[in-house]
Image (cartoon, rainbow, N blue to C red):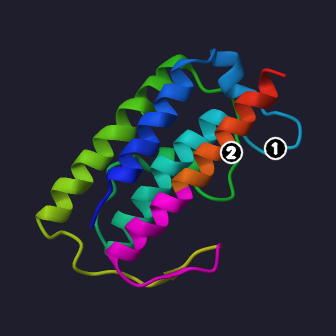
Amino acid sequence: MNINSTIKTRENFIHLINGMTLAELNEIPTGFNNNIVWNFGHVIVTQQLLCYKLSGQDMLVSGELVEKYRKGTKPEAPATSKEIEELKILALSTLESFKNDFMAGHFKEFNEYTTSFGATLRNISEAVEFNSIHEGMHLGYAMAQRKAVRA
């Protein structure tokens, strides 16, 4: 199991966010249902749901965060600078913890799940592989949103 591409995607997401204003990060560009902050929070929450929850493990993020950024949600209020800083910390710390938990053998059980993409995940390795694709897609959305808010 290799999560290096996910780590790189998260680093690129943080780099993108670091170069933007709070207003730009919170703006929902025309043609989109969400903003850059939502996409960033969404990838963090989704990795936790796919890897931890489907494996019957306790997630490393709060239920409040899950409710705010899970699939099917949209921004209800602007994120604060403090919230964005917390997300940046979680982005990398949750992956480091996941690596450690994986090495410790915490993901032996897995509840099969079919994603909205139509991919059926049967084990933790498939969840990690799918998550990497999912995160890359949302980074791409965020890059398009950056271009739109700066147009």
Q: Earlier in the sequence, mark 2 or mark 1?
A: 1
Residue name at image x 49 percent, y 26 percent = 15
Residue 71, by quadrant, is bottom right
* Foreground residue among 143 and 33: 143
Residue name at image x 49 percent, y 44 percent = 65
SS class, disc 2: helix
Magenta stretch: includes residue 98: no
Question: Residue type at mark 2?
Answer: Tyr
Magenta stretch bounds: 117-134
- Residue 81's label in the rendered image is none
Q: Quadrant of the N terminus?
A: bottom left
Q: Position of residue 59 (x, y in %)?
A: 34, 56
Relative side of 84 to 107, left or right? right
Residue name at image x 26 percent, y 55 percent = 98
Question: Residue type at mark 1?
Answer: Phe
Q: Please tell me how crowded label 2 is: few (under 14), some (14-19), or many (20+) other residues with Cα within 10 Å.
A: some
Residue name at image x 29 percent, y 40 percent = 93
- Residue 32's label in the rendered image is 1
Q: How many marks?
A: 2
Residue 11, by quadrant, is top left
Q: Position of residue 123 (x, y in %)?
A: 35, 80
Q: Is residue 23 above or below residue 130?
A: above
Q: Are marks 2 and 1 in contact (CB under 8 Å)?
A: yes
Label 2 belongs to which residue? Answer: 141
Relative side of 40 to 8, left or right? right
Q: Please tell me how crowded label 1 is: few (under 14), some (14-19), or many (20+) other residues with Cα within 10 Å.
A: few
Residue 128, by quadrant, is bottom left
SS class, disc 1: loop
Relative side of 54 to 74, left or right? left
